[in-house]
Amino acid sequence: MSNSKQQAQELIDFIHGSPSTYHAVNNIRKELNEAGFQELDLRDEWKVEKGGKYFTTKNGSAIFAFQIGTGEIEEEGFQMICAHSDAPGFKIKPNPEIEVEGNYIKLNTEVYGGPILNTWMDRPLSIAGRVSVKSNDPLHPEHLYVKIDRPLMVIPNLAIHLNRAVNDGVALNKQKDMLPLLSMITEEMEKDNCLVKLIAEELKIDAEAIIDFDVNLFEVEKGCIFGLNDEFISSPRLDDLAMAHAGLKALLSVGNSKKTQMLAIFDNEEVGSVTKQGAGSPVLRHILQRIVFKLGKDMEALHRAIYSSFMISADMAHAVHPNIGEKHDPTNRPFINKGPVIKIHANQKYTTDGDSGTVFETLCKNADVPYQKFVNRSDLVGGSTLGNVSTGQVDIRTVDIGNPMFGMHSVRETGGVEDNAFVRKVFTYFFGL
Ligand SMILES: [Zn+2]
């Protein structure tokens, strides 16, 4: 297997094992632990030193890993890559069981972020997330992770015979049309609370111990490499686990440098980032401050460190679509496997400017990685990302980039095998500076 195919397979394996933000962060935590990074609790007093490797998590769904440089932090600053752990989809509501005409049980869900709804239909789905369990401390329940590895439900389409206009486009109602079918009702079945009972069985605990849950649907089928020459990746959640994974692999593959390397994986980008574990919170600023102060430096040194830093805000980008190319800018045409994309927006939904764009282009040139540019068509409104939200909290020079892909926010997204290898290469070069 070629090196880039092997790296694409690593990404697919990582995403398959990460069907919720909690699982993604826990998998990153495991890899950091294995690589000798020491976990710091946000509530404890920190001890950090030059050359040390550390990480901390917030809410179990955001993670910040850093390798402290051997130089003076106020002169060398932070080399940062940020990405996000969350993906659009469906959360299970409390009291989710709905009985249908005495025969079916379906589950009540709430849409999280902006999924392409129709891609979720007719696919075997299951559930994953965090379960909060009674503990002796009323302020700190115990948290367990659940991931049920078998197909549990489907959101069925309506037959074309019952809706002849289906191929003209169908408006799907989030409350009515998108509820997954879980089971048939049988006589022996205890249908009340059956989801909590299922989770309890999976976790081998009493159903009464489960107080609450943050559980989402996920597509059971694993991602794959496809294409005539095995050049594409089909997977759920490429946005943005592909960038989180590339950042992690880059961090794990570099040794100490004079600069402090940091990987910041935030949660809740898909719902605007303004949560305690999102890029709109002060969490990153507080972590930077603690690092600088715990190295025995002062506020002046923190500010100098921030203004000596550079951030790559990494979130996936749109490749020119093979069937609908007219939706893209006429002169900037990013294609799959032609390298990471620098995202540019005159009104600064992306943080890139001539300065930070030049830095990223230079990084790519030096790392021998091709790169491309993305600008929205002027009559279309694009998405936003982490960079501009994060700079509202910490004003670091930042570039917005991401790998080109099709079908962003589909349950199954398409990216490029070579692009994954390219971005890992340029991230590794950046962290190694
Ligand atoms: Zn994203």
Image: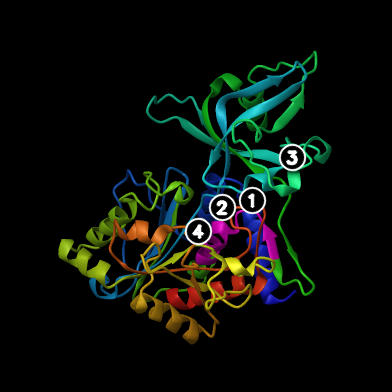
Span of residues in magenta: 233-248
Q: Position of residue 15 (x, y in %)?
A: 62, 55
Q: Nearer the viewer, mark 2 or mark 4?
A: 2
- Residue annotated with mark 2: 27
* Marked residue nearer the N-terminal end (3 or 4): 4
Q: Position of residue 10 (x, y in %)?
A: 65, 63
Relative depth, front residue between 24 and 184: 184
In magenta stretch: residue 243: yes
Residue 238's image quarter? bottom right
Q: Residue at (69%, 27%) from the top-left corner?
A: 106
Mark 1: give few (<14), some (14-19) or many (20+) Cα within 10 Å: some
User: Is 283 placed above or below 192 here?
Assistant: below
Q: Position of residue 45 (x, y in %)?
A: 29, 48
Tag 1: residue type?
A: Gly
- The circle on residue 17 is 1
* Marked residue nearer the N-terminal end (1 or 3): 1
Provide the major secondary structure of the magenta segment. Answer: helix
Mark 2: give few (<14), some (14-19) or many (20+) Cα within 10 Å: some
Residue 266 visible in the current orientation: yes
Look at the numbered discs 1 and 2 and tell me whether their residues touch, using CB distance below 8 Å: yes
Look at the numbered discs 3 and 4 and tell me whether their residues touch, using CB distance below 8 Å: no
Q: CA distance from mark 4 to mark 1?
A: 16 Å
Tag 3: residue type?
A: Arg
Mark 3 CB near ligand 1 (8 Å cut):
no
User: Is 116 placed above or below 361 here?
Assistant: above
User: Is 201 placed above or below 154 here?
Assistant: above
The residue tagged with tag 2: helix, strand or loop? helix
* Marked residue nearer the N-terminal end (2 or 4): 2
